[in-house]
Amino acid sequence: MQLDQEARIYVAGHRGLAGGAVWRELQRRGFTRLLGRSRSELDLLDAEAVQRFYATEKPEYVVMAAAKVGGILANHTQPAEFIYANLQVQSHLIHGAWRAGVKKLLFLGSSCIYPKLAPQPLKEEYLLSSALEPTNEWYAVAKIAGIKLCQAYRRQYGCDFISVMPTNLYGPGDHYDLQTSHVLPALIRKFHDAKAARAPAVTCWGTGAPYREFLYVEDLARACVFLLEHYSDERIINVGFGRDVTIRELAGLVKQIVGFPGEIAWDASRPDGTPRKLLDSSRMFALGWKPEVDLEAGVRLAYQDFLTRPAGQ
Ligand code: GFB
């Protein structure tokens, strides 16, 4: 089904990494009636404010890219915020979408919903088959609840709510705060700052041995618009790149792209997190979507974004 370019599409989290990319992709595709609200305009933790928004703006489609997100340290040290904020925001948005008669809703989950030691690559059916990775289980449990909300409203009320599981994302609009960011923006900032300071070495966290799969966020945005138009199923669907790298390899790539001449040190007192989480995206690939930006090109684009970001971000 082709979406009408006049459709009222609400992108929750349109200033974030994923939501911002979805917003730009929809604009690029000629959609003219996009709805976005900043946090100060609409507090998604406020159920009544969300209901009022739905009642007055009447979105027909909703992309749920609003979430409390962060890297391994933020997840590990703020468990209450990660579980509370995500449970609230997604409950308000999903329940509100049902009440408002939204035609279709796309919920963005995460690859950390899968068990820590599940077979690789991770197939959709491995969800809830064994224990989660402890560093981010609070966030993962909230995301699993979001999936279950979508499935429950589909079963009980026939709502066309779908759940999409992206792998680790990066690209324009990322956050570069070293305490809360994910690994890729953190490495860009660390190598860039070390080069500027002529430091002899950059210290990365953990052992460097874990594998991670990275998807350029504009590829995810294309996938989301594609799924809004072509996917209607209770089953979750993975959206990944198809290949992963070790954190050690990633650090080497960022060092080279940034042009840092010094050494890389590893601080093994920091957590590694899950050893590997490569998504099996074969169902998504079979539908006809493929990523277009490989890791090296994507890191170059992300570094450009870092260099041109507004001061203080
Ligand atoms: O991206 P990241 O923070 O989170 O870390 P996860 C990935 C890996 O990079 C870990 C290592 O093994 C880190 O120890 N790493 C090395 C670093 N140096 C750094 C550094 O300077 N900063 C950071 N942040 N990591 C997150 C989850 O897990 O993935 C979230 O916590 C979410 O819930 C997200 O699912 C996609 O990949 O381990």
Image (cartoon, rainbow, N blue to C red):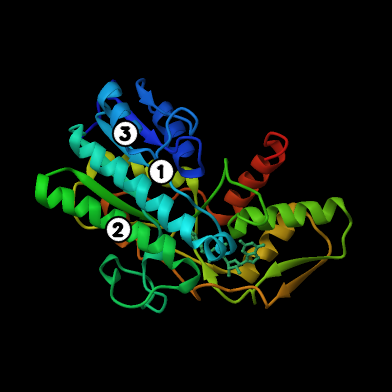
Q: Is mark 3 within 8 Å of ligand 1?
A: no
Residue depicted at 40% across the width and 63% down the height:
140
Across and down, in percent, residue 55 comes to: 25, 25
Say whether residue 33 is left or right of residue 265: left
Residue depicted at 45% across the width and 46% down the height:
219
Q: Amino acid at mark 3?
A: Glu
Crowding around mark 3 (Cα neighbors within 10 Å: few <14, some 14 to 19, many 20+) is few
> First in sequence: mark 2 or mark 3?
3
Identify the residue position indicated by label 1 in the image.
Answer: 65
C-alpha separation, residue under disc 2 versus residue under disc 3: 21 Å
> First in sequence: mark 2 or mark 1?
1
Crowding around mark 1 (Cα neighbors within 10 Å: few <14, some 14 to 19, many 20+) is many
Q: Quadrant of the C terminus?
A: top right
Say whether residue 34 is left or right of residue 206: left
Q: Quadrant of the N terminus?
A: top left
Residue depicted at 36% across the width and 70% down the height:
122
Across and down, in percent, residue 203 comes to: 75, 67
Across and down, in percent, residue 68 comes to: 47, 50
C-alpha separation, residue under disc 2 versus residue under disc 1: 15 Å
Say whether residue 132 is left or right of residue 91: right
For mark 1, give the secondary structure. loop
